[in-house]
Structures are given as C-alpha cells and as structure tokens.
Amino acid sequence: MDSDFITEVERAFGDSRDDALMQRAGEIIKKGGLVAIPTETVYGLAGNALDPESSKRIYAAKGRPSDNPLIVHIAEFDALGPIVREIPEKARLLAEKYWPGPLTMIFKKSDRVPKETTGGLDTVAVRMPVNKTALSFIKAAGGYIAAPSANSSGRPSCTTAAHVYEDLCGKIPLIIDGGDVGIGLESTIVDMTGDVPVLLRPGYISHSQLEEVLGTVLIDPNVNGAELGGDIRPKAPGMKYKHYAPRGELYIVKGGEQACTDRINSECRIHKERGETAAVICLNTEVEKYTADVVSSLGNTYEDAAHNLFRCLREMDEKKIEYMYIRAFDGEGLGMALMNRIVRAAGHKFIEV
Ligand code: TXA
Ligand code: MG
C-alpha cells in the first residue's frame, strides 16, 4: 500500500506564502501519513512522533530496521516537557545556546512517546530545527514530528528535494521542496541522560562548542568509526549500520600528503588498466595533484565539504563509478563530522600509507 502514492513536490518559501501548503502537509501527518521536509541539516521524512503507526510507516518507506530510533522534532522549547521524564540543567543550558539549530539531545522519555518511535528504547532523541519551513510544518502538524533523514536506508542523506524524489518516489504523497539545505550533514547528537554528557554523532556543532557550555563532554568510542564490528555496542543504534553508501567501493586513504597522492594516483591507474571506473573525491586545493579521469571537488573549505559530500556520493552513482578514493579528514569540529560520515560510507575500508 505504501508504494502506491503519486508523489507531489511542492516548493516552499519559508514565509506566509506557504500557509496553504503547511495546512495540507499538516493534515497528511494528522491522518497518519508521511511528508518529506527540508531542515537546515538534511531533508527529513516526517510522521507523527506520538503515533506508533506513523513510525512504522516511516521504517517501511525508508526500508529501515525498526530498532533504529527516530529523532522527535519540536518547534518550541515548551513542547519538550511532556515527552521527557526530566530536563537536566545542562540540557537547558545547551538548548538556550543551540536551539533552534543542528543539535539533537537524548533524554529519558515519558510515556507519551511510543516505543515504536524510539526503536524500543526508554530514551528519546529531540531536536528543534531552525529552518523556517520545518518549524511552520511542525506547528501545523501538531507539534511532535518524528523525522529520520529522508534517504532510503543505507544511501547518502538527501540535501535536495530531487534526492528525496529519487529515493522515495511512489512511497509518500508529498515532498516539500525548500531548496538546497544549508549545512549538509545531520545534527550533532549528545546523550544528556547520564552525569556526564556524551557525544554520539558529531555534526556542525562541535565537541569544543559543547564543552564551552557543558564542561566535560565524553566522545562515544563509536564516533570515530574504526572500532565498529568490535565489542562496543553503539549508543546511537543507527551508527552500527552501513550508511551513506554509494554503490561503488569507497576507500579512505590515511597518511602523509605526498604518500597519499602517490597511492591514490597509482590505484586509479591500475583501475584504468583493468577497464574499471575510478574517481578521487577531494578539496579544491588538491584537484591538480590527481591524475584520475574523474576528480570531484568538495569545494574549498570543510564547510563546503560538509555541504557537498552527500551530493557528491550520489553523483558517483550517476557516473557509475566503481572505485572511489578520499583522504582522511582530521581535526575536531567539521573534520570529525566528515570523517564520521565517510568511515560509514566506506564501510570502514582504510588504506594506510
Ligand atoms: O539532522 C538530523 O538529525 C536529521 C534531520 C532530518 O533532522 N535527522 C536524522 O535522523 O539524521 P536519522 O534517523 O537519520 O538519525 C538519527 C540518529 C540515529 O543514528 C539514531 O540511532 C540516533 O539518532 N538516535 C535516535 N534516538 C536515539 C536514542 N534514544 N538514543 C541514542 N541514539 C538515538
Ligand atoms: Mg540517517
């Protein structure tokens, strides 16, 4: 049944011109249906977070395992109280500084949030986005929206409405097109349920920005990815799955600059000799160094790279690239967030030189 929709794409402007559209989208949600929406991080696939049937439909449309919990999106701070058991003082401070914005906090959940939404957990992830269209949509839809990234499970997240259409056409009735997203990587996730906050997923808001407000913030060992497959059980269950993956094979090359360049060029030469397609993904400043037939630039800065990474991975599929090489990113901030995504996109394949 869920694959039987004619999917409409409607442009939003982020102002009062959208009123009729928001009302229509809100009605779909209130009846248990799904709508894809823009946020400042990536596009989300929205349903009513307080309705177990809506959450089941989200899992079905994405093809996502149902033990992977959803983020509840709210439009005002007062909406937080009813869905959590307590609001720790530190969470209040962080919300004051970074909500609305690309920050998700984990709380102990109240009974109002069904287990279907939290993947069976007693905790709930909550975020207040800053995107105007997202905020008016959440209000029109009753105030509590479950929204995972709007990609099919396993694929790169969607940074344009066209990406959502590619993945979910026929599976949902409506995509709200808010243009290209601003940030391009999903929100930073911090677990606020223990004595010391724990960073579970790095994003635009960095570890040091969190520590400025909170004091010590631990970093979950799974954040850096290399440990996956070991004994460590990821605290953000979504982090255990292969993610963001292009169809070809992506390798992360680690080491000194010249050694990396030489190795990537030689790998690409070998692929070419074998008649295989290969590409390098890199920053603009590095494009000239590579001799591969396809060298795809992520832009000049880490901010550009965050904005362009998922689009670039999708383009690799369009170009039918079989092998991709990217140098490891470093640094905390966006470097850590980018590295976290490419480690998963690469299925943890590293080449150390
Ligand atoms: O920027 C974002 O956060 C986007 C936009 C649409 O808001 N949403 C997003 O949702 O990235 P999703 O479902 O693709 O990723 C949610 C992540 C998953 O890794 C999931 O395991 C984790 O949040 N998560 C959700 N609830 C959790 C909980 N109670 N405890 C720990 N991790 C949780
Ligand atoms: Mg996702």
Image (spheres, helix red, strand yellow):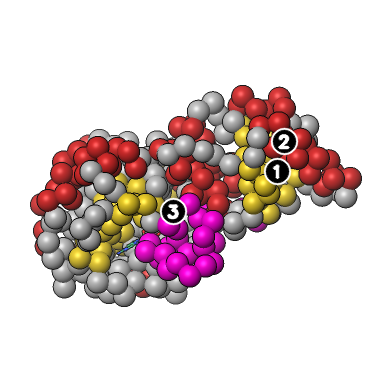
Mark whose residue sits in front, 2 or 3: 2
Give the CA distance from mark 1 to mark 2: 6 Å
Q: Residues within 10 Å of mark 2 (few under 14, many from 20)?
A: some
**Residue 285 locus on image (x, y percent):** 61, 24
Residue at mark 1: 353
Q: Is 172 within the magenta?
A: no
Tell which circle, 1 or 3, labels the residue nearer the N-terminal end.
3
Q: Is residue 259 left or right of residue 142?
A: right
Q: Determine the CA span between mark 2 and mark 3.
A: 26 Å
Looking at numbered disc 2 in the image, what kind of residue is underneath it?
Answer: Ala
Q: What stretch is highlighted in magenta?
A: 221-247
Mark 1 or mark 2: which comes first in sequence? 2
Which of the two residues, 328 or 353, is positioned nearer the viewer here? 353
Q: In this view, does 81 lie above or below 231?
A: above
Quarter of the image where the C terminus is located: top right
Q: Can residue 275 be seen in this view?
A: yes
Contact (CB < 8 A) between labels 2 and 3?
Answer: no
Q: Given contact means CB atoms under 8 Å apart, are the residues at marks 1 and 2 in contact?
A: yes
> Front-most of 194 and 293?
194
Residue of label 2: 259
